[in-house]
Image (spheres, helix red, strand yellow):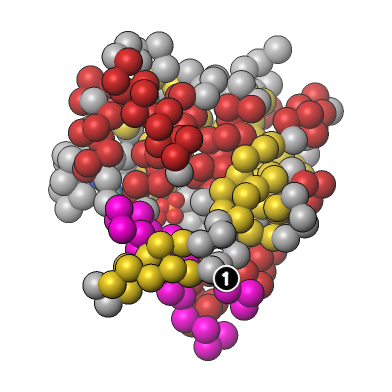
Amino acid sequence: MQPITVIKIGGGEGIDLQPICEEVAQLVRAGQRIVLVHGGSHETNTLSERLGHPPRTIVSPSGHTSRRTDRQTLDTFTMVYCGRINKRIVEDLRVHGVDAIGLSGIDGGLWTGERKKAIRAIEDGRTVLIRDDLSGKVVAVDATLLTMLLESGRTPVLTPPAVTADGVAINVDADRAAAITASKLEAETLLLLSNVPGVLADPNDPDSLIADANSAGFDTVRAAAMGRMKNKVLAAEEAIAGSVRRVVIGSANGDNAIGRALTGRGTVFAAQQIVTTTEHATARAIVEGS
Ligand code: ADP
């Protein structure tokens, strides 16, 4: 049986999904088992503006950023993620002969999540508590359903939202959802592809790529990551602390983006090289504490 690869495609500006779908089709034709996860942040922002409900960002005291998700935002989010982007990817894959099936985390309770009860946020320099946000994180994945789909030759295309045990849809970070999915499927590789070449030591210098996260040290990688890159690094650490052998944070742009990431172009996190207990303990503390 071929090992499983989970590929998360970012939803940032300028990511061209067509060549990615073509490449996924080539890999599936070659017998690879692939689970695709996608985002949609840029299009959600654009549509939110057009619908007169502009996007807002929550900044936590530790500097993590997330989308402020009220009911109207969640509706817009669902239109973009589960609608246009998910179905466009499924269509593109089917055009290339892949038996793709699009599912959100709500469908069949695929991604069960916990809703954040209260979020500490920094607003105008003050810490405030937000209690009505419809966001959280994935805590369980229906790996049986995904395995069944893969065994029947389907390629799952997954997207947030997730759903709570009470049936409420919640916005979850797609990178971290991809990470727990890869862990629960015991995937060999997780690719987190976006519009940057990987984690840059200096976010403004595209030539400052940190190629080997293990050699650099996870603390260094974590410290370099700003804004939304923090979630990708956290996702990579969570996957490695789970059962994934290798995570690559790489570019979704240009020719052969998946092939390049698979050969290690980007920032590579490797499981077998985690030898220091401090690093492992830190990764675990982040996973358990967040
Ligand atoms: P997605 O495509 O998954 O939505 P994002 O575009 O939100 O991903 O996340 C990647 C972004 O993170 C980059 O566009 C970049 O602006 C930002 N970033 C912050 N710190 C770094 C860093 N150290 N290296 C690379 N990118 C970084």
Q: Nearer the viewer, residue 134 or 199?
A: 134
* Left or right side of 42 for 282: left
Q: Is mark 1 on a helix, strand or loop?
A: loop
Classify the position of the C terminus by image quarter: top left
Locate residue 56, reporting x and y percent: 43, 74
Residue in the image at 80% along x and 34% along y: 145
Locate residue 275, reporting x and y percent: 32, 11
Q: Which stretch did the figure color magenta? A: 51-73
The image quarter in which residue 24 lies: top right
Residue in the image at 36% along x and 23% along y: 281
Within-10-Å neighbours for mark 1: few <14, some 14–19, many 20+: some
Q: Which of 182 and 8 is in front in this view?
A: 182
Tag 1: amino acid:
Asp
Q: Cβ of disc 1 within 8 Å of ligand 1?
A: no
Image vertical order of residue 252 relative to residue 187, above or below: below
Locate residue 59, reporting x and y percent: 35, 63
**Does the stretch in magenta take in 285?**
no
Image vertical order of residue 95 relative to residue 278, above or below: below
Residue in the image at 77% along x and 47% along y: 109
Image vertical order of residue 26 relative to residue 95, above or below: above
The image quarter in which residue 65 lies: bottom left
**From this viewpoint, is residue 197 visible?**
yes
* Left or right side of 189 for 147: right
Q: Which of 258 and 272 is in front in this view?
A: 272
**Does the stretch in magenta take in 59?**
yes
Q: Give the overall secondary structure of the magenta segment.
A: loop
Classify the position of the N terminus by image quarter: top right
Q: Mark 1 points at which residue?
A: 132
